[in-house]
Image (cartoon, rainbow, N blue to C red):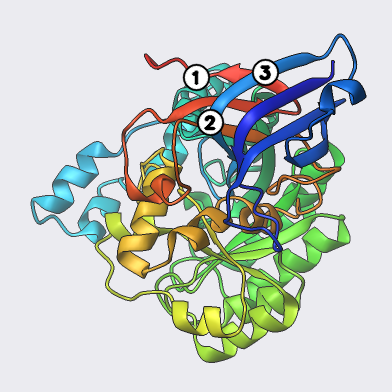
Amino acid sequence: MERILTNLKLVTMEPERGYQIIDNAMVIIRQGKISYAGPQQANWQDTVDSQADIVDCKQAMVTPGLIDCHTHLVFAGNRANEFEQRLNGVPYEDIAKAGGGILSTVRATRAATEDELFALASERLAGLKRDGVTTVEIKSGYGLTTEDELKMLRVARRIGEQADIKVSTTLLAAHALPPEYAGRSDDYITLVCDEIIPAAAKENLADSVDVFCEGIGFSTAQSARVFAAAKAHGLMIKGHTEQLSNLGGSALAARMGATSVDHIEYLDEAGVEALAAHNTVATLLPGAFYFLRETQQPPIAQLREKGVPMAISTDFNPGTSPIASLRTMMNMACTFFRLTPEECLRGVTAHAAQALGLSEQCGQIRTGMAADLALWNLDSPAELSYRMGVPDLIARVVDGNLFYQSKNQ
């Protein structure tokens, strides 16, 4: 069905229009794609199908649907007790030795069924939908066996079968060393490269492959092996890099063609240069920065100077960012990292799409793009980063289908 959105304030996020509102605008949608977006034309009724669904937006502000480009939505278990323990002075090392930390999530996720994981992830996803998210990336990484990693990815693909959300899936088997491989990290990387990646690719369960390149994760040499295996199977690559130290993982990932590198608090000048040279997105995760009470900030000024695109994401996960609100992340990026509201909106639209390799499909409102939109009861796009918790969302549009947001949700 042809759908016409009229009487709206349009924020396209196109480079030549960007943040500026086009008043008295309209969007024409045909077969789930945008066929026109711009000023409302005087004779527009003469050019559309008589059976078209015409929606008077009543001066709603319309942006691209928001994109959460880094999440760990699929997992079981709960680590609120560890949060409380840390605040009561218990060191993380003691928590981990007692069976806590990421391996507690691994145990719970391995024990959960696909239906259980689907139900849990769907509840978390509801928070993102309330913030206008139409596309979300979901990683594996809490299974750490072939069977359990594929289980997580199947759940993520199942979530993406719903009409009101799009899902990009990422295999993060190289997230942590499973206990059965203690002291044998190279052997585990061999399993990831020779068995898990090929299995995920064969079943078309992953769009990308990610690695936690860090002192408590995997080395740059091991990360390079994983990236090479992913590319050999036609999968995109991305990295958890420079979160806790500077190993050079970001530069490695960029040189090997990564769409994004994420966290990057300890990124150095050479890393920034590599991202700029290879047009790799720097994904900022202020939720983890906040939750861990970090003080080392990403090199925002250098990223700006070199023109590195910056995305923003929730990093929703049970240990370091249990926050299912992308607008909260936009506000945190402004307050902690001093991004402007325009940079934040671009970070959850056009740049987030680039981080997922989806720049030609979503993240902007222009002819030929998917009709993925968010309708807001707002006067200015700056308000998206300015306040939190107010139910400003009117509706989301996914592939041209309209989903109204209940104020009670």
Up/down of 142 relative to 403, above or below: below
Foreground residue among 348 and 284: 348
Spatial CA span between label 1 and label 2: 14 Å
In terms of secondary structure, where does tag 2 sit? strand
Q: Residues within 10 Å of mark 1 (few under 14, many from 20)?
A: some
**Amino acid type of the residue tagged 1 in the rendering:** Gln
Q: Quadrant of the C terminus?
A: top left
The residue under the point 76% across, 50% down is 358
Residue type at mark 3?
Answer: Val
Question: Which class describes the residues within 10 Å of circle 3: few (<14), some (14-19), or many (20+)?
Answer: some
Q: Which mark is residue 290?
A: none
| Residue bearing mark 2 | 60
Write down the residue under mark 3: 55
Q: Quadrant of the N terminus?
A: top right
Question: What is the x, y in percent for residue 403?
Answer: 60, 18
Q: Amino acid at mark 2?
A: Ala
Q: Secondary structure at mark 3?
A: strand
In the rendered image, which residue does mark 1 sit on?
405
Q: Position of residue 16 (x, y in %)?
A: 71, 63
